[in-house]
Amino acid sequence: MAPIPTPPAEPQDTLDAYVGLPAEGAEQQARERGWSTVRSLPPGAIITMEYLAGRLNFEVKEGVVIRCWKG
């Protein structure tokens, strides 16, 4: 059996700090802090539940981050 791969370490970041920021600035800041993938989603977007290490998700309403989570 093949060994289970070790996922890369995620940036040590305070996710609540992104809430209330303009989406473009929050995305740039997240990339600078080491997040490999950053995606912005509209409120209520239908997404799959797979977890992707290193990904940061923003829920954006009217150009402002209203929610942030890993995966």
Image: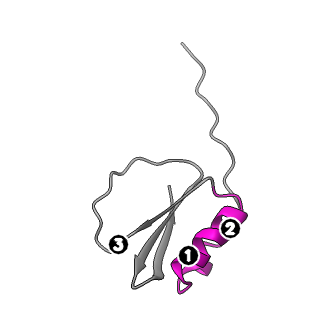
Quadrant assignment, res 62 = bottom left
Q: Is residue 5 above or below residue 32?
A: above
Q: Is residue 67 above or below residue 39?
A: below
Q: Which residues are magenta?
A: 12-35
Q: Which residue lies under the disc numbered 2?
A: 13
Q: Which residue lies under the disc numbered 3?
A: 42
Disc 3/disc 1 C-alpha distance (Å)? 14 Å
Q: Secondary structure at mark 1?
A: helix
Circles 3 and 1, Cβ within 8 Å, touching? The answer is: no
Disc 2/disc 1 C-alpha distance (Å)? 18 Å
Image position, residue 10 (x, y; %): 66, 53
Quadrant assignment, res 17 = bottom right
Circle nearer the N terminus (2, 3): 2
Q: Amino acid at mark 1?
A: Glu
User: Residue 24 shows which numbered tag?
Assistant: 1
**Magenta span includes 46:** no
Q: Amino acid at mark 3?
A: Pro
Image position, residue 36 (x, y; %): 62, 52
Q: Nearer the viewer, mark 3 or mark 1?
A: 1
**Magenta span includes 20:** yes
